[in-house]
């Protein structure tokens, strides 16, 4: 067991939640010191841009097992949304430097990027030609519910599940810029409580496709990743121009359980919210999605 996982086992959740922002702040300042000392790395060759609670940590762990992939300082850097003010030099200091004769690649995975307004434009302005994008899309209803329980575990969510979903429009809209949790985390109400808002995938993807071109994106469902991880990661290797490889460790991470039963009426209501947007997403991607037909079967009235 490594030190990070040992700490998770030994420390209560509440203590970890208080320590985590400070630990991350210290790590970010180490990167700042590296930048001031003249250390800088490459701009990432790939970015996993979404979605939150969609398996991005699992996929990133698989990718960095490839012998020709070097990891960033941390999987989720959050530069283009939460830490933009630190500057592009700080961002590049999160990645290794590459010599002229070296051919390995590196990348990061920040699942907030696809959702946060203005991020695509910032990356477009800063990105050298060649950076590619990976997107995992999870059933938006299940993603929203999983997001809620994730917020409960982190301590940012105090409301019951029905109340939290009812309050989302206000929290993400008028109160979207309000700071949540520890100030060092740079997390806002819009980051933490955007349960349903994050699920309008077609609207978000169009912005990215228009800026970067559809050919620069690998888009897959989280459901297929967890069902067939080796197939998916090998497709991503090929998309990134890497040789075929079988990662030695294929173990999902960050899979949380629901702490209470989710009201069936709430699930059905969220399903109905996403029925039209999911059809739009299928049109955009030119393929059917596994959760669409499932929702229609679950929500139809008995004959």
Image (spheres, rainbow, N blue to C red):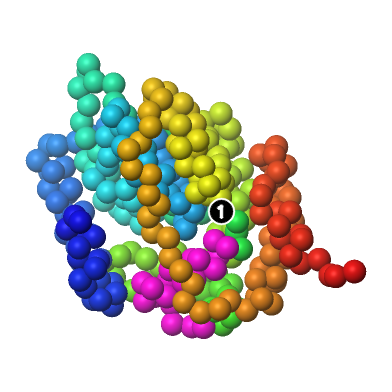
Q: Badge 1: few (under 14), some or many (20 or more) residues near its Cα, within 10 Å?
A: many
Q: Is residue 53 above or below residue 17?
A: above
Q: Magenta segment range?
A: 142-160
Q: Position of residue 129 (x, y in %)?
A: 42, 26
Q: Main secondary structure of the magenta part?
A: helix
Q: Quadrant of the C terminus?
A: bottom right
Q: Is residue 298 above or below residue 31?
A: below
| Magenta stretch encompasses residue 143 | yes
Q: Position of residue 296 (x, y in %)?
A: 76, 60
Q: Viewed as shown, does residue 58 lie left or right of 37?
A: right
Q: Which residue is mark 1?
A: 138
Q: Viewed as shown, does residue 279 lie left or right of 10?
A: right
Q: What residue is shown at x 24% (from left), y 68% (from top)?
A: 9
Q: What residue is shown at x 37% (from left), y 66% (from top)?
A: 187
Q: What residue is shown at x 53% (from left), y 47% (from top)?
A: 227
The residue lying furthest to the left in this view is: 37
| Magenta stretch encompasses residue 16 | no
Q: What residue is shown at x 60% (from left), y 51% (from top)?
A: 201
Return the residue nearer the eye: 101 or 297: 297
The residue lying furthest to the right in this view is: 303
Q: Position of residue 300 (x, y in %)?
A: 81, 66
Q: Is residue 138 visible?
A: yes
Which of the 4 image quarters holds residue 100?
top left
The residue lying furthest to the top in this view is: 101
* Element type at mark 1: loop
Counting labels gives 1
Which of the 4 image quarters holds residue 89?
top left
Q: Is residue 126 visible?
A: no
Return the residue nearer the eye: 74 or 234: 234
Q: Quadrant of the N terminus?
A: bottom left
């Amino acid at each position: 067991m490594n030190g990070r996982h040992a700490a998770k086992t030994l420390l209560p959740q509440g203590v970890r939640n208080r320590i985590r922002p400070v630990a991350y702040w210290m790590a970010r300042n180490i990167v700042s010191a590296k930048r001031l000392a003249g250390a800088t790395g490459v701009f990432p060759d790939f970015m996993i841009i979404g979605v939150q609670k969609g398996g991005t940590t699992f996929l990133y762990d698989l990718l960095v097992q490839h012998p020709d992939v070097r990891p960033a300082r941390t999987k989720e850097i959050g530069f283009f949304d939460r830490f933009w003010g630190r500057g592009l030099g700080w961002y590049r200091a999160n990645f290794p430097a590459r010599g002229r004769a070296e051919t390995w690649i590196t990348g990061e995975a920040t699942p907030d990027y696809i959702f946060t307004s203005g991020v695509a434009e910032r990356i477009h302005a800063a990105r050298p030609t060649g950076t590619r994008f990976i997107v995992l899309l999870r059933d938006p209803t299940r993603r929203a519910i999983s997001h809620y329980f994730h917020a409960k575990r982190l301590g940012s969510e105090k409301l019951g599940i029905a109340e939290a979903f009812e309050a989302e429009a206000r929290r993400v809209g008028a109160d979207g810029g309000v700071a949540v949790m520890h100030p060092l985390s740079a997390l806002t109400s819009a980051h933490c409580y955007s349960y349903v808002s994050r699920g309008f995938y077609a609207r978000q993807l169009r912005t990215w496709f228009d800026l970067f071109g559809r050919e620069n994106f690998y888009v897959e469902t989280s459901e297929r990743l967890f069902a067939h991880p080796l197939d998916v990661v090998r497709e991503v290797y090929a998309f990134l121009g890497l040789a075929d490889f079988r990662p030695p460790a294929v173990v999902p991470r960050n899979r949380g359980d629901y702490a209470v039963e989710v009201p069936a009426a709430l699930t059905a209501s969220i399903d109905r919210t996403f029925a039209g947007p999911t059809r739009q997403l299928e049109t955009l991607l030119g393929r059917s999605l596994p959760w669409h037909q499932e929702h229609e079967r679950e929500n139809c009235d008995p004959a």
